[in-house]
Amino acid sequence: MADRLSALDASFLYLEQPTTPMHVGGLAIFRRPKTGFDYDRLVELIEQRIALVPRYRQKVRHIPAGIARPVWVDDPDFDVNYHVRRSALPKPGSETALHELVARLMSRPLDHTSPLWEMYLIEGLAKGRTAVLTKTHQAMVDGITTIDIGQVILDVSPTPRPSAEEYWIPERDPGPAKLVLDAVGEMVARPGELVDNVRAAAGDAAATVGKVVAGVGQLFSVARTAARKAPGSPLNVEISTQRRFAVARTQLEDYRLVRSAHDCTVNDVVLTVVAGALRDWLLSRGEAVSASSAVRALVPLSVRGEADVPSSAADATLGNRVSSFLVDLPVGEPNAVVRLHQVSHAMREHTANGQSVGADTLVRIGGFAPPTLHALGARAASGFSKRFFNVLVTNVPGPQFPLYAAGARMLEMFPVVPLAKGQAMAIGLTSYDGGVFYGFNADRDAMPDIDVLAGMISESLDELLGTVG
C-alpha cells in the first residue's frame, strides 16, 4: 500500500496558492577547492546520497474524486538532472545579483507532477565562491521520516564519507483502481475522515487546516499573548507572487559577549537585535512609533539547556526539546538595554508559566535537524491568520565547525523561510562555524527596502555591544 500523506502534510498542498508557494529554501556559500566544485560533481554526490532520503524520488498522486488524502509513489521517470540545475551570475558575480536570482527562483512554485524539490548550483560568484540553493516543499520535510536534502550532501571533513552503491528500481505505479480500493479500505476503518477528504478535494482548505490546528492547538493555547490581536503593522499586507531576498552576517561571539554582560540567553540577544533593527526600519519609513509600539513575532526555537550551540562534531545533533513562543518585540523602546531586559523577561515568563510546546507536540509539526527546523517555523505559521503575529523569526543553532560538500568548504548558510498569507516578511537565521547568518525573504511589492532592514541588523547588534563594559 502506498504511503499516504498525513493530514498536516496534505494541508500544505491544499493551502498552496500563487502568492504563497509552500517550499522552504536554503542558500549555502562554498569556497571552491583546487580540485573544483562543478555541476557534475554535485550531481554525482546527489546520486550517491539520495538513497538516504527516498522521498526525494517520489511524487504525489491524488486519489480519484478526492475521497482520501494523496499518497507518495515512486516516480518511474525520475531524472536527477531535472531536479539539480545549473545557473550562473553575470560578471562580476555580485551578491546583489545572487540575491536577485535567489528571489526569482524562490518565487516559482515547484512542479507538482514530479518530486517536490529542486537544487541549483550557482556559479560565477565573486572571490572564487559557488552557491547552492535548495527548494523543498513543506509537504515533504517532516523532520522525522524525511529531512532536507541539503543535509545529506554535507560532510564533516573535505574527504566525502563513503556511500553504498545502490541500484534503484521504482515500485510499480498502483494505478487509479488500486488507489481507490486502498482508500475505501482505510475509510471503512476510519469513516470520519471521508467528509474531511471530500471538503479538501473541493477546495475547502480551511476544513483540513482546522483539523490540523486542532492537533497542534497547544502551540497557541499555551501562549497568553495569542489572546490579543497582533499590533497593526506594515508587515501584514496582501502579498504578491514575487519575492525579494537579503542577508545579514554577524559573529556569534558578539552575541555571547552581550549574553554574559547582561545575564540572558543568546536567543534573547537575537530577538533584541531583530527588535532594534525593526525599530530603526519603521522610523526610516516614517511610521508612527510610540513608547508602547510592538511587533509580535512567532518564534519557534530549539532549547538546548546550558549549551546554546553544538561545539563539536560529537554534539552536532540538536536536542530533543523545542519551544515556540509568541513574543511582543518592544520596538517602541529607544534604549537597547531596556529592550533586552523586556525581551528576556518575556521569554522567562513564557518558560516559567509552562508556555513552551512539548517535544511530543512538535514531533507532529516539524523536525529537529538544523536545516529542517526552519520548516517547522513555516509550518507553524501557515495555518494561522495574520491576526496572531506580525513576523516569523526562526532561529536555528547549527554546528560550530566547518562542513564540506564534495570537498568544498561551506562558508555561510542562509535560510529562506516562506511567507504565510498576509505576511510581508519572514526572517530565518542560523549560527554556523562562528557566524550568525540571517536570511530575509520578503514580498517584492511590500518590502522594496528589505536591504535597508538587513543592514540595520549589524547596527542594532553594535548598539548592544556598546553596552558591554
Image (tube, rainbow, N blue to C red):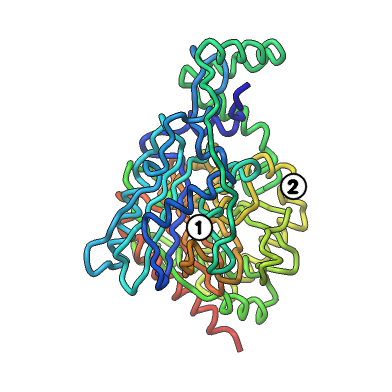
Label 2 crowd bin: few (<14), some (14–19), many (20+), radius 10 Å: some
**Picture quadrant where residue 83 is located:** top left
Q: Residue furthest left?
A: 91
N-terminal of the two: label 2 or label 1? Answer: 2
Query: Residue 309: x and y, percent?
Result: 65, 67
Q: How many marks?
A: 2
| Quadrant for the C terminus in the image | bottom right
Find numbered disc 2 in the image and state the secondary structure of the residue it sits on: loop
Give the residue at mark 2.
358
Residue at image x 57%, y 39%? 54
Please state if 37 lies on the left or on the right of 45 as rendered.
left
Residue at image x 38%, y 44%? 81
**Picture quadrant where residue 154 is located:** bottom right
Label 1 crowd bin: few (<14), some (14–19), many (20+), radius 10 Å: many
Relative vertical location of residue 201 with respect to residue 284 in this rendering, above or below: above
**Label 2–label 1 contact, CB within 8 A:** no
**Label 2, label 1: how far apart the Cα atoms are:** 22 Å
Residue at image x 46%, y 55%? 26
| Quadrant for the N terminus in the image | top right
Relative vertical location of residue 298 with respect to residue 202 in this rendering, above or below: below
Q: Amino acid at mark 1?
A: Gly
Residue at image x 48%, y 50%? 46
Please state if 213 lies on the left or on the right of 247 as rendered.
right
Find numbered disc 1 in the image and state the secondary structure of the residue it sits on: strand
Query: Residue 107: x and y, percent?
Result: 35, 45
Query: Residue 325: x and y, percent?
Result: 64, 52
Give the residue at mark 1.
428
The answer to whether residue 256 is seen in the rendering is yes
Relative vertical location of residue 98 with respect to residue 43 in this rendering, above or below: below
Residue 448 or residue 180, whichever sits in front: 180
Q: Amino acid at mark 2?
A: Gly
The answer to whether residue 283 is seen in the rendering is no
